[in-house]
């Protein structure tokens, strides 16, 4: 296995014993239609799994085609075998360490020249491979004609044209894959220029001689990647055979000296010119591409004025729909769970500890359901829809300038928007950013975004008692506070963000299956990480109430409530808001002994309470993923920072509300 | 010799050729992976307001490039 921290290099072989089906791996650049192909053939029992120890997921399924059964694995899309983010790294590790029978290299036919760069690197793995030339209809429409036989001849692998979205060519593809699994035919070794290939060959020989215990992937690949200064491979060598590195540096030097530029540039230029020459040999452009309607849409949606207008409009419609759908479903659901709790207490009595624990657990389950179904589910579904159509990268384009002002770049807008649903998947999504500093700032910002649970508090208290416009002001102020925080924090960490270089893919018709899959993956983060903590929190809370600890806790937190000018009884609800933010509101009703809060709290107090809830500390589940993503030390910084921020904002709100009311 | 410009200095709807990419290993790799290499032809489709990114077309795909990274790309205009 390729080591995570690293002792030995070698391919997993334990699987061979009890493996029955050929293991087929789909790999290609992002947006090549890989997942569409996967969904076209995958059974309903496909599973998504996390890479061990990582938050990156891949999907796996048994597939039966023409009587043959395969294990089909869909890896995250990558542009090259040099890794930048976690998804790249895990894909790379998987390809190097797993025992793979056939690689299906999925290629967007209209982007053949760029895709070939990945193809050439994959061929260096020396694993049997088939190229799936996907979306050939789109390429033909653009006037790109590919000579498939000639391409197949040049690469030495089978090439099958498909239109995965319409199921065309898919059966043929897997027929070829099955044959390749048996013949174990690997591609032709495509040589770079003589002088470069000579250096690679020398290094390859040196590696073969010095790495005694051997590696299970190709030495040629290792040599090329070391000359490319790929950190992943360099680390593998540094960990296992540090003495070789000096020789590697010498080879890098040698190549740099003879070509007048660094060795990674030499290798890259070689690969690029190989790709281009293959491309030029096999592709004919038969007509001039004309402006397609998809590009006409971008003239509006990415326009410097209209683009922003539409962005605001879309967000307005999006959130409005969710609020409306959510509030219709939420009320009857809360009632249902209240009825269950009541009947439990009727059966077991209110005095016993057992009854307390059970009703606490039921409230926890109910709280989860009441957030997930009405708010989180429609939110994540809508977001996945926008993602699948291809709108999100456009949002990243539009928001890049704004995000730069807060020290990040356009891509960071995606975790931030996800935060409005649930902070847990939002923090997990920061892994799409390249630098640790960017991930830290993006994590901090995503946690400050009011999630669906906090939304129920904002709507249920401020929206209900003070009106919708005040609720809107809270959201707006939140964006301003986030912007200021981002700016200040990025000044404190003055490293330059690597900047954005992302593909803006063509729009495509949404595919329900892909959207459902994405929604499910994110819901899963909530269900397995956040929900259990919600339930535990509820139980602890019930026990505290059972033993009358509330007095003591109110006492402990009284400095905060005094500073904010809130009734002392509110203290407990603030503590338990850490477990579940929306619980603070439900508990407020309980602590005050009434559902008519205005009779016991002033408008100003309601506003202060809500603003404090929005900012004060991330919920337990979010703290958990933060620790996993940015480490405990940074997590504590975030927690303490948010607590102080919430106090300051709460006190300012208090001052303002005294002036207004 | 033709005049060399930064990608950020090129007007919209112009076609240019990449002369070199400045900056370190990271910047080069990030550009390479989305298909931008020395010698390649780039078409500038639009640029965002207030220091927003550039939208360029390269090898048939659209790429959004932040100003910072686009500044590292040195280009020369292509004669029509």
Image (tube, coloured by chain):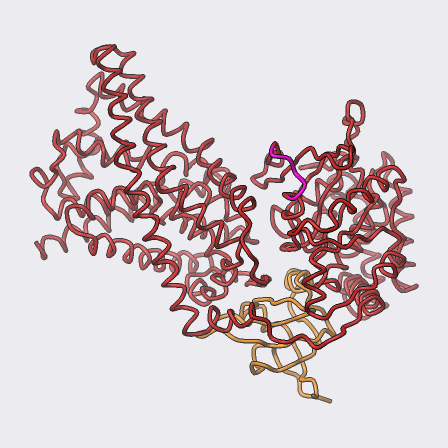
Chain colours: A red, B orange
Pinpoint residue A267: horizontal percent, then vertical percent. Answer: 80, 61
Q: Is residue A193 left or right of residue A245?
A: right
Q: Quadrant of residue A334?
A: top left
- List x then y, in percent, for residue B40: 72, 73
- From the image, which quarter does the C terminus of chain A lie in? bottom left
Say if A527 sits above or below A451 in the image: above
Out of A518 and A176, give the one closest to the viewer.
A176
Q: Is residue A43 part of the magenta span, yes or no?
A: yes
Camera-side residue of A583 and A545? A583
Location of residue A378 (image quadrant)? top left
Instruction: Say which residue appears at 16% left-offset and 43% top-offset.
Output: A563
Q: Position of residue A47 (x, y in %)?
A: 60, 33
Q: Is residue A222 visible?
A: no
Is A568 placed left or right of B14 in the picture?
left
Q: Quadrant of the N terminus of chain A?
A: top right
User: What residue span does the magenta drawing correspond to?
Assistant: A40-44
Residue at image position (47%, 54%) is: A414
B9 or A109, which lies in front? A109
Residue A366 in picture, x, y percent from top left: 33, 28
Q: Main secondary structure of the magenta part?
A: loop
Left or right of residue A321, residue A588 in this image = left
Q: Is residue A590 magenta?
A: no
Note whether residue A358 is visible: yes
Which residue is pictured at 70% across the width and 53% down the height?
Answer: A82
- The answer to whether residue A12 is above or below residue A401 is above
The quadrant holding residue A552 is top left
């Amino acid at each position: 296995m390729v080591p995570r921290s690293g002792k030995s290099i070698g391919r997993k072989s334990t699987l061979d014993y009890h493996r029955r089906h050929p293991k087929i791996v789909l790999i290609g650049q992002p947006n090549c239609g890989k997942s569409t192909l996967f969904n076209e053939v995958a059974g309903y029992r496909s599973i998504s799994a996390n890479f061990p120890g990582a938050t990156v997921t891949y999907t796996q399924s048994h597939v039966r085609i023409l009587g043959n059964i395969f294990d089909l694995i869909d890896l995250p899309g990558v542009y090259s075998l040099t890794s930048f983010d976690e998804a790249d790294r895990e894909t790379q590790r998987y390809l190097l360490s797993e025992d793979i029978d056939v690689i299906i290299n999925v290629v967007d036919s209209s982007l053949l020249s760029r895709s070939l760069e990945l193809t050439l690197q994959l061929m260096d793995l020396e694993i049997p491979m088939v190229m799936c030339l996907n979306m050939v209809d789109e390429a033909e429409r653009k006037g790109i004609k590919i000579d498939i036989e000639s391409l197949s001849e040049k690469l030495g692998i089978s090439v099958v044209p498909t239109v995965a979205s319409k199921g065309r060519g898919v059966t043929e593809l897997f027929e070829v894959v099955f044959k390749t699994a048996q013949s174990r035919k690997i591609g032709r070794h495509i040589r770079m220029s003589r002088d470069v290939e000579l250096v690679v060959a020398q290094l390859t020989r040196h590696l073969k001689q010095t790495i005694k215990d051997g590696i299970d992937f190709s030495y040629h690949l290792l040599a090329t990647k070391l000359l490319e200064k790929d950190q992943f491979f360099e680390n593998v060598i540094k960990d296992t055979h540090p003495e070789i590195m000096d020789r590697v540096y010498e080879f890098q030097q040698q190549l740099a000296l003879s070509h007048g530029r660094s060795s990674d540039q030499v290798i890259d230029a070689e690969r690029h010119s190989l790709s281009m020459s293959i491309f030029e040999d096999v592709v004919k452009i038969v007509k001039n591409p004309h402006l397609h309607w998809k590009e006409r849409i971008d003239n509006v949606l990415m326009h410097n004025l209209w683009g922003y207008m539409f962005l605001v409009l879309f967000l307005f419609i999006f959130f409005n729909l969710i609020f409306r759908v959510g509030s219709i479903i939420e009320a009857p659901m809360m009632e249902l769970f209240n009825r269950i709790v009541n009947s439990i207490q009727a059966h077991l009595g209110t005095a016993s500890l057992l009854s307390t624990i059970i009703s606490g657990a039921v409230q926890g389950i109910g709280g989860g359901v009441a957030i997930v179904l009405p708010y989180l589910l429609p939110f994540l579904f809508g977001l996945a829809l926008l993602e699948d159509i291809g709108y999100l990268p456009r949002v990243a384009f539009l928001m890049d300038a704004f995000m730069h002002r807060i020290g990040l770049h356009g891509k960071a807008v995606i975790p931030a928007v996800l935060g409005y649903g649930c902070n847990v998947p939002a923090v997990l999504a920061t892994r799409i950013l390249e630098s640790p500093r960017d991930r830290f700032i993006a994590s901090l910002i995503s946690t400050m975004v009011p999630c669906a649970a906090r939304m129920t508090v904002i709507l249920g208290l401020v929206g209900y008692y003070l009106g919708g416009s005040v609720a809107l002001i809270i959201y707006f102020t939140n964006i301003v506070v986030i912007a200021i925080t981002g700016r200040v924090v990025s000044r404190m960490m003055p490293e330059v963000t690597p900047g954005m270089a992302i593909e803006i893919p063509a729009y495509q018709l949404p595919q329900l299956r892909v959207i459902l899959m994405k929604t499910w993956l994110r819901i899963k983060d909530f269900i397995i990480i956040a929900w259990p903590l919600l339930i535990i929190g509820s139980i602890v809370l019930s026990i505290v109430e059972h033993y009358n600890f509330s007095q003591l806790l109110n006492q402990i937190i009284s400095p905060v409530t005094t500073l904010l000018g809130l009734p002392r009884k509110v203290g407990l609800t603030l503590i338990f808001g850490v477990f579940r933010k929306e619980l603070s509101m439900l508990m407020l009703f309980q602590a005050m002994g009434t559902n008519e809060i205005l009779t016991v709290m002033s408008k100003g107090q309601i506003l202060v309470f809500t603003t404090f809830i929005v900012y004060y500390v991330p919920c337990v589940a979010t703290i958990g993923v933060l620790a996993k993503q940015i480490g405990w030390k940074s997590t504590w910084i975030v927690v303490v920072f948010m607590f102080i921020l919430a106090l300051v904002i709460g006190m300012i709100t208090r001052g303002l509300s005294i002036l207004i009311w | 010799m033709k005049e060399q410009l930064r990608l950020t200095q090129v007007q919209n709807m112009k076609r240019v050729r990449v002369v070199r990419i400045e900056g370190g290993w990271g910047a080069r790799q990030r550009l390479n992976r989305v298909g931008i290499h020395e010698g390649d032809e780039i078409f500038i489709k639009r640029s965002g307001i207030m220091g927003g990114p550039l939208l360029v077309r390269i090898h048939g795909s659209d790429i959004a490039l932040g100003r910072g990274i686009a500044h590292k790309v040195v280009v020369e205009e292509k004669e029509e």
